[in-house]
Amino acid sequence: MDEFHRWGGSLEDDFLRVLSENLGQLLGTSRIFVEPAEMRFPLDFRVVANVLKFEGTPEGDALFKVRWGILDAHMLQALVIRDDTYRSRAASSKPGAMVAALSETLSAFSRDMAEQLRGLAKTEVAPTPPEPPSDRAVNERAGFLPVSGLPLPSAEVEEATVGSR
């Protein structure tokens, strides 16, 4: 594009805002959060996406390629993993036509994601991850035992915790 036709905002922020608005409308909820955000509500799912391409081609197509997935609320299990490519033909060679075509690819992605989310069984209460083991259990598994009942220094406890995973 020429110097007078440039994106005016943050592409990443605008992309995420439009995606979250699309999902909210398609799923009939206002409980769509874009990270980093302060979570004050329990989550049902987490969605991750890696945008590989979001651009216009010399042939006049809008191209959007994305690798994405849906995880459980605690990010312990991948429920959906996909690689998708979306194309839309720009109606003309004007910059506004390419923006509209790119917008259509994002809308198609939003519809596919909403369909996948609708298909997943919503749990009443998201399962709580297991409690981490006590410092003593971590230390014993790592081979560290307190001498004379004295606790280990915190640096050793942290090292044992990292090493036990």
Image (cartoon, rainbow, N blue to C red):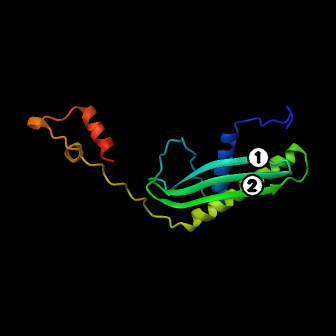
Q: Amino acid at mark 2?
A: Thr
**Residue at 46% over, 58% down:** 77
Residue sitting at x 60%, y 64%: 116
Task: Classify residue 117 by image quadrant.
Answer: bottom right
Q: Nearer the viewer, residue 125 or 15?
A: 15
Horizontal relation, residue 159 to residue 118: left or right? left
Which of the labelled discs sits on residue 13, or is there none?
A: none
Q: Residue furthest left?
A: 148
Q: Which residue is mark 1?
A: 55
Q: Where does label 2 land, which residue? A: 105
Residue at 53% in and 66% down: 120
Residue 51 lies, with reference to residue 3, above or below; the image says below
Quarter assignment of residue 36: top right
What's under tag 1, amino acid-wise? Glu
In the rendered image, which quarter contains the N terminus? top right
Q: Position of residue 32 (x, y in %)?
A: 58, 51
List x then y, in percent, for residue 58: 85, 47
Mark 2 crowd level (few <14, some 14–19, many ≥20, 10 Å Cα): many
Residue 38, x across and y down, in percent: 50, 41
